[in-house]
Image (tube, rainbow, N blue to C red):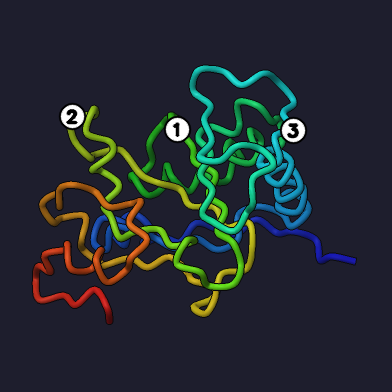
Amino acid sequence: MKNKFIPPEIHRDAASVFQDQGFDQAPQLIPEDHIDASVVHMDSVIAGHYETDPGNHFSSSVEPGSPTDQLIKINNAQGVDATLLALISYPLIGSWASALFGGAEKVQVWHSQLLYKPVGGSPKGNIGLHQDFNYWQFFNNIEGILTAWIALSDVTIPSGAMRFVPGSHRWPLIDPGNFGEQDEEKALAAIKVLDGIDVLE
């Protein structure tokens, strides 16, 4: 029997950590049963089983039924699956995002990406080093914008966890973005290391 989920309190310095580092690591915000259901529905969407017809904003990097031995990226999966919609609009995520901006009155999800990384450590599962704002430049500036990354599996260093460079949100944009670059050494070579920070540390 799983332990009863107790929603965590938002720590007092969340906003200052976010502004200083460019990211903040929240504790578990979503109950295990909701995560488990989301994994099942993620697999269903990857396999091409949709609860509603895909709209203009839905897209997938692979055809349903294709081998899952590579990185799979699906845009706006919540448009075809109610469980995934409930996941990305989970109230505590919005509360945490609001706190990062010092108490924003409203938080809006304008885009989502479902990313599936295959097991085994193949370079085909790599996501290149990048700055998110390279892909958001239709906004006037970065103020009031963030990415909420929701892990649907345990994340450890051996599993290929995401890495952040503290303070890199203050760097100028490194153009072009290299989200799709699966050669990590090539991606690293494209980054101009600023402020004396070594991204490999």
Residue that label 2 marks? 140
Residue that label 1 marks? 111
> Disc 1 and disc 2: Cα gap in Å?
17 Å
Instruction: Mark 1 vs mark 2: give the one in front.
Output: 1
Amino acid carrying mark 2 in the image: Asn
Q: Residue at x 48, y 48 (%)?
A: 96
Decide if residue 94 is in sight here: no
Instruction: Mark 3 vs mark 2: give the one in front.
Output: 3
Amino acid carrying mark 1 in the image: His
In the displayed structure, 3 sits above or below 22; it is below
In the displayed structure, 108 sits above or below 44; it is above
Q: Indicate the position of residue 111 as horizontal and vertical percent values.
A: 45, 32
**Label 2 residue SS:** loop
> Disc 3 and disc 2: Cα gap in Å?
37 Å
Identify the disc placed on residue 176: none
The crowding category of the residue bearing disc 3, from other C-alpha atoms within 10 Å (few below 14, some 14 to 19, many at least 20), is some
Q: Indicate the position of residue 192 as horizontal and vertical percent values.
A: 11, 64
The crowding category of the residue bearing disc 2, from other C-alpha atoms within 10 Å (few below 14, some 14 to 19, many at least 20), is few
**Label 1 residue SS:** loop
| Quarter the C terminus occupies | bottom left
Q: Residue at x 51, y 69 (%)?
A: 122
Q: Quadrant of residue 156?
A: bottom right
Q: Earlier in the sequence, mark 3 or mark 2?
A: 3
Amino acid carrying mark 3 in the image: His
Residue that label 3 marks? 49
Q: How many labels were placed on the picture?
A: 3
**Label 3 residue SS:** loop
In-front residue for pair 122/86: 122
